[in-house]
Image (cartoon, grey):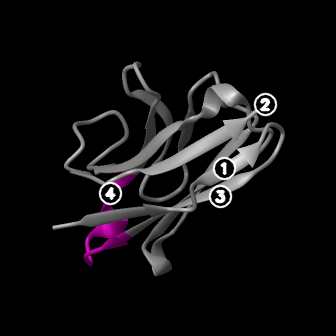
């Protein structure tokens, strides 16, 4: 079992930065790829970024590439999403999810953290 808890969301002005954290419990955390998704009001959930268990491979949605950076610290059981140059359209609830590989079915989800970017 892996439990995921997101934190770090909040209100920020356009152009600002936030760092989200996804803290995991469970000794098998390092075996999982971790992805970030987001869902804005009235919209479908969308993929944001993903990182393999080894950190060798990272993936980004076109809308955030060059502005967001995903990383992980397996010793701390934590994955980070550094978000820079935030835009109002980045406003959403952000979720992290764990699965055996990037792009595979996700076994575990966090409860989400709200990010609001004001113009």
> Residue 17: horizontal and vertical position, in percent?
76, 50
Tell me the residue that label 1 is attached to.
11
Q: Which residue is mark 3?
A: 19
Can you identify the residue that label 2 sits on? 119
Q: CA distance from mark 1 to mark 3?
A: 12 Å
Return the x and y of residue 81 as percentages of the image width and height: 59, 52
Earlier residue among tags 4 and 1:
1
Q: CA distance from mark 3 to mark 2?
A: 19 Å
Residue to which mark 4 is pinned = 32
Task: State which region is magenta.
Answer: 24-33
Q: Is residue 94 left or right of residue 63?
A: left
In the image, is residue 57 part of the stretch drawn in magenta? no
Work out whether residue 34 or residue 116 is closer to the camera in this orientation and state it.
Answer: 116
Measured in 3D between alpha carbons, the distance from the residue under mark 3 to the one under mark 4, in whole angstroms, is 21 Å
Looking at the rendered structure, the number of numbered marks drawn on it comes to 4
The reply to whether discs 1 and 3 touch (Cβ–Cβ < 8 Å) is no
Earlier-in-chain disc, 3 versus 2: 3
What's the residue at 68%, 42% (across, down)? 68
């Amino acid at each position: 079992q892996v439990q995921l808890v997101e934190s770090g969301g909040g209100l920020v002005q356009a152009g600002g930065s936030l760092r989200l954290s996804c803290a995991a419990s469970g000794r098998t955390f390092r075996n999982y790829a971790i992805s970030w998704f987001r869902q804005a009001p009235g919209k479908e959930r969308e993929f944001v970024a993903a990182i393999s268990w080894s950190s060798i491979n990272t993936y980004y949605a076109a809308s955030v590439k060059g502005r967001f950076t995903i990383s992980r610290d397996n010793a701390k059981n934590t994955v980070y999403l550094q978000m820079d140059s935030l835009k109002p359209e980045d406003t959403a609830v952000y979720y992290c999810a764990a699965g055996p590989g990037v792009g595979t079915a996700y076994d575990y989800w966090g409860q989400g953290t709200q990010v609001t970017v004001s113009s």
